[in-house]
Image (spheres, grey):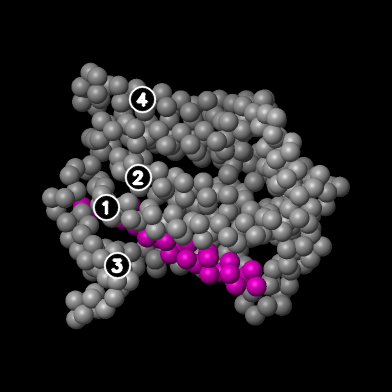
Amino acid sequence: MKNQIKNTNSITKMLFNMMVSLPAPSSISYMWNWGSMLGIMMFMQIMTGLLLASHYNPSIMEAFNSIIHINREINNGWMLRFLHMNGSSILFIMIYMHISRGMLFNSFKMMNTWMSGLIMLLLLMGISFLGYVLPWGQMSFWGATVITNLATAIPYLGESLVKWLWGGFSINNATLNRFFMLHFLMPFMLLMMIIIHLAFLHLTGSSTPLGLNNNKDKIPFYPYFIVKDMMSLFMLLMMIFLIMFINPNIMSDPENFNMANPLSTPMHIQPEWYFLFAYAILRSIPSKLGGVMALLMSIMSLMMLPFMKKMTTSSKFMPIKKYTFWLFSMNFIILSWIGANPVEYPFEMTGKIFSMTYFMLLFMLCFFLFVLKTKYKVML
């Protein structure tokens, strides 16, 4: 029966090889479920986004009202909107967990898979920023103003680039139309990257918690890992619906319940929570160009990890690397908390300290471990 389904056509054969007969290391744990959960969440985001786009009006006069119309007048429109809105936050929770697992268990050794994943992260950040602007609330407008103004830090081209991006001399109707168009199209680019990411993953196979050769003991993906993924899916859906039915606005900014007003600036402008760590790094540096460079490096620096090829031992056998990772994770959380607070004492100074330790833990300590591992052959 399986062979009959498999040999129906090339598409079913490809799906069969990816989801049924794919050999996977028997030792991988539930930490390896984040990838499949991300795929399911991405599918849900695209489907809810397509349905919402059919009722959204990308006009500065009607965008805010169209969101109210979706919530109140469209049948189950409130559910679609809250699924899409909270789904983006849950998507980032899972992608940060997915990256953390890769750092902890040395999945970055698979260079092509790691690099394609980081490109997907950058695309997802762009999509999320564009989507945050679309409701046209106060924080949407002023967040877009602050973030797009960062392009003025580019020497010579900055001012012209911002005017081209805005479609005028300030954020206006043309800007909102462009952001809506990009927010609609970029997820399909992300889908292409997901296919490339999966292709690279299936070429090399998954990493293992022990960091050992993953070709020694493999079992079929179905039924063993399908069951584990279904358990994770059940927990994920339960969490989404609990948030949606109990407190759907828990991750929203209160300022976004007011329509955008260019004449009224909020007391504290901040992005969504999943950008707060980068925002804290950005504002900790007085120079605009330096802040923008540090913001970009906070993500791009993760692309350095695959070049540490000789550091191949899992964190289970390297306590110092494990401690470094957890220090880095705590630093990330503290930076996110600092980014949510105004630029005043003590948050200004602590932001500078933890921005410095963010890069120190990522560069200096990791490279220090690399030197110890390769040059002095010390067992850590």
Q: Nearer the viewer, residue 50 or 69?
A: 50
Q: Quadrant of the C terminus?
A: top left
Vertical relation: 50 (above or below) 362:
below
Residue linked to disc 1: 203
Q: Amino acid at mark 1?
A: Leu
Q: CA distance from mark 4 to mark 3?
A: 40 Å
| Left or right of residue 111, residue 70 in this image | right
Q: Amino acid at mark 4?
A: Phe
Residue linked to disc 2: 112
Q: Quadrant of residue 367?
A: top left
Residue 115 lies within the magenta run = no
What secondary structure is marked by label 1?
Answer: helix
Sequence-first tag of 3 and 1: 3
Q: Amino acid at mark 2?
A: Asn
Residue linked to disc 4: 367
Q: Quadrant of residue 269?
A: top right
Q: Amino acid at mark 3?
A: Met
Q: Which residues are magenta?
A: 27-54
Q: Position of residue 38 (x, y in %)?
A: 43, 58
